[in-house]
Amino acid sequence: MSLAISGSSTGVLDWPAAFKDALVTALVAGALGLFIVGFRTADFGKGLGFEYQFVDLAIACGVIFAGRFALSCARGGTSVVTLLLGAGLLAIALLAPLPSAFLRTVSGLAGVALLVAGTWTSVRGTSAGGGRIAALSAASDVLGTRVFPWFGAALLGVAVVLPFMPFADQKVMDLGILILTYVMLGWGLNIVVGLAGLLDLGYVAFYAVGAYAYAMLSTQHGWSFWMCLPVAGMLAATFGVVLGFPVLRLRGDYLAIVTLGFGEIIRIVLLNWTDFTQGPAGIGGIPSATLFGRVFAENAPAGGQTFHEWMEIPFSANHRLIFLYFVVLALALLTNFVTHRLRRLPVGRAWEALREDEVACQALGINPTNTKLTAFAIGAMFAGFAGTFFAAKQRFVSPESFVFIESAIILAIVVLGGMGSQVGVVLASIILIGLPEWFRDLGLYRMLVFGVAMVLIMVFKPRGLISRREPTIRLETGGGP
Amino acid sequence: MAEPLLLVAGVETFYGAIQALHGVSLEVNRGEIVALIGANGAGKSTLLMTVCGSPRARAGRIAFEGEEISRLRTDEIARRGIAQVPEGRRIFPRMTVFENLQMGATFADPAWFAADIERVFGLFPRLKERRDQRGGTLSGGEQQMLAIGRALMSRPKMLLLDEPSLGLAPLIVRQIFETIRLIARDEGTTVFLVEQNAFGALRLADRGYVLVNGHIRLTGTGAELLADPQVRAAYLGGH
């Protein structure tokens, strides 16, 4: 199938081979898609029956055929065809009455990709263009080192002003809170995975500990969010130490498997210890976070005061979301700040050194067990904070929120962001959490977007979005050449 | 004579059922350079690692400044003032030269840091030039310099070097040996090194031990061993 592709990129196009290759690709896609896209079971009132979507399938195969052929053309040096086909697909996506939004998105994306590929090859084909590309990439490197320090600050600026933008409705605020929660979890896990190099597949367990700690302390003992926050963090850190102690002599894959097991144990205990956790029914009626005792509700509880009464502004349901948004932003920034500080302290440097070479660390007098435990405990503590916030935001917790896929997503954010990179975690959260939400119209296919985003990042940035490691210290005096 | 800095007496080390060291005894006195030479697989690195607590000695005593250390963990032994330069250098590849040196000073008095870093940069000017460069991008010789410099940052009482000449160009080897001599002579740091490069090591050392199949076979001053016909035949290729 890769006949035309594997040929040299400057070769002359072999039209019949390219045509055949595209045809084979389309047929394979059709055969694979026949059962996935072609049939759908639907309820016809009298029982289940098949619904046929052969038109969708045929159009998708057509798009694939055109795309494959156009890519072969680009490789063969005939990028005009690529550009034409790309423009054609884009036009179809925008103008033609396609039967589903999914097809519209697929052919639109394919068209854009072909336009980019065609432009790229035609520019690279000319010698002047090649030189320009080299110059451009050199310039972008320089730009990267110049702009990079400001990039984080710019992101922070956007995050701070976002709630006051005119488009910041409930949906945007919800998404913002969700992304920031994952940013915080990503930063917390980054301490364990990115800095200390311990592969933890059960991170969600500590998130669950924090969430249940707040859920139970608030509903059964009337503790407030702000009282619970440090307690839940400490509790999660204690769990980190308790779970970490027996497993930390394991390395790599073995550690990953055992942490995976611990994550599941916590969830299963929450599920089955019904007397204590109310099991699968979960805990509801959890009070939300308050601002100096003022609640975010339309009517104040007995003896209390609401936020809008206190501020003397009209009530809006959005106030609560904006407040929660700033709470999670502050918690995330706290995580980031503490991580930054710790990296400059001996314990943080020891984490990184341990990731690099455990034997060398022991030779320098560093106790690997204690060092790993501190990383585990501090990482778990931030998961506990995030869990408390999660419970306060959702006002309901159940074991279903703490399944393995959550650990996997958080880990994916850390790895795709570039292990150990703080800004990388933010970008990866926006892409992995934000994209599927924006593509919610695609229904079930949105998980496809999630998968495609992951594959694309790993293909183009195999070491993560931001693979630079900032040294913790640089000497100012008499620098290098 | 005064108590030796490091005393190894009747040490036996096993890898599973296989015995690697058979009743090895040696001593290293303060301020000395002591070389341990031997063929591949004689147990040289095993002896050095046994001193560091991994693997543990199954029998015998290891005492540092009169204190029994054979039951301590590697990191505890390191904090007693024994700095190891492990085989294969084992610098931290993604950390800069400066950060690597900082790691060496983890358990040193912070007040020493500025002076110690200057001292290491004085010994190895190449490291000063490359201080913001990542450890992994250094050449083999520079990595060896970094490993030694990192070990020196803790102001150790004794420096253990495992094959510092391994895989390095002859010119660099001579530089490294020269620096080891400086460290011992000018700064009074005791050096215990394990080497396959018997000629270089014995010329550098005050005293040497020859290890054969896990037994100490010969001992004497560096010059005596260099002149010994057995040593010349076995390790020096008739130099």
Image (cartoon, grey):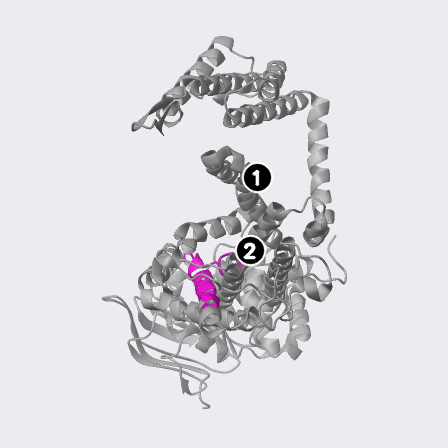
Membership of B149 in magenta stretch: no
Helix, strand or loop for the magenta stretch, by majority: helix
* Numbered mark located on residue A286 in the image: none
Task: Identify which residue, A358 or A67, lies in the foreground.
Answer: A67
Q: Is residue A149 left or right of residue A447?
A: right
Give the CA distance from mark 1 to mark 2: 17 Å
Name the residue tied to disc 2: A181
Q: Is residue A78 left or right of residue A199?
A: right
**Splitting the image into 4 quarters, where does residue A471 fall?**
bottom right
Q: Residues within 10 Å of mark 1 (few under 14, many from 20)?
A: few
Q: State which region is magenta.
A: A190-215
Task: Identify which residue, A291 or A425, lies in the foreground.
Answer: A291
Q: Secondary structure at mark 1?
A: helix
Q: Could you tell me if residue B85 is visible in this image? A: no
| Residue A160 rendering spot, x and y as whole percentages | 70, 54
Membership of A214 in magenta stretch: yes
| Residue B194 rendering spot, x and y as whole percentages | 44, 67
Q: Is residue A31 left or right of residue A119?
A: left
- The quadrant in which the N terminus of chain A is found is top left
Q: Earlier in the sequence, mark 1 or mark 2?
A: 2
| Residue B19 rendering spot, x and y as whole percentages | 26, 68
**Disc 1 and disc 2 in contact, CB within 8 angstroms:** no
Name the residue tied to disc 1: A438
Q: Secondary structure at mark 2?
A: helix
> Residue placed farthest to the top in the image?
A16
- Confirm whether circles 1 and 2 share one chain: yes
